[in-house]
Image (cartoon, helix red, strand yellow):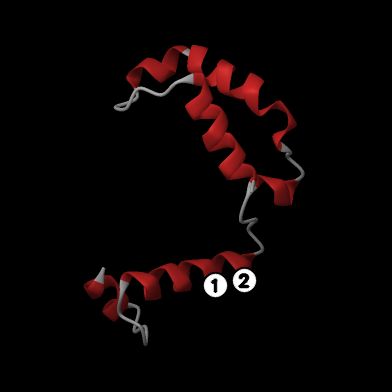
Amino acid sequence: IFLFARYLQLDDASAGGVVAWVLSWRDALGIPGNLKEIGIVADNAKDIGQLAFEDPSAGGNPIHLSATDYSDIFRLAVG
């Protein structure tokens, strides 16, 4: 991280400085920070969590997650 921050010539050559740089670019480009900012709401989090749990590709995840885990992640992503 330090080398990357130095390459970018950031005043704050730390992980926090890199994160601040990324967030400033996100804001400058108008990229939403969470799903809520593009109109997605958490009303169906339980159903979405269950669908994610049942998705065949979920078996390839390195960490086993429950339907509740997926629902919680979705709620966090909504913001």
Q: Which mark is residue 8?
A: none
Q: Nearer the viewer, mark 1 or mark 2?
A: 1
Residue visible at 30% across and 80% down in the picture: 13
Residue placed farthest to the bottom in the image? 11
Give the total of numbered labels. Answer: 2
Determine which residue is flagged by label 1.
24
Question: Which residue is label 2 attached to?
Answer: 28
Q: Quadrant of the N terminus?
A: bottom left
Check the image and name the residue furthest to the right.
39
Marks 1 & 2, CB-CB < 8 Å contact: yes
Q: Residue furthest left?
A: 3
Residue type for callout 1: Ser
For image coordinates 53% across by 20% down, the residue present is: 52
Describe the element under mark 2 as helix, strand or loop.
helix
Q: Position of residue 39 (x, y in %)?
A: 77, 44
Q: Residues within 10 Å of mark 2 (few under 14, many from 20)?
A: few
Relative image position of residue 7 (x, y in whole percent): 28, 78
The residue at the point 62 percent across, 71 percent down is 28
Other-residue count near label 1 (Cα within 10 Å), few / some / many at <14 / 14–19 / ≥20: few
Residue 26 lies in quadrant: bottom right
Amino acid carrying label 2: it is Ala
Task: Examine the rendered structure and indicate whether residue 25 appears above or below residue 42.
Answer: below
Q: Left or right: where does residue 68 sit relative to residue 10? A: right
Q: 4 or 53, which is in the foreground?
A: 53
In percent of width and height, residue 40 lies at: 73, 39
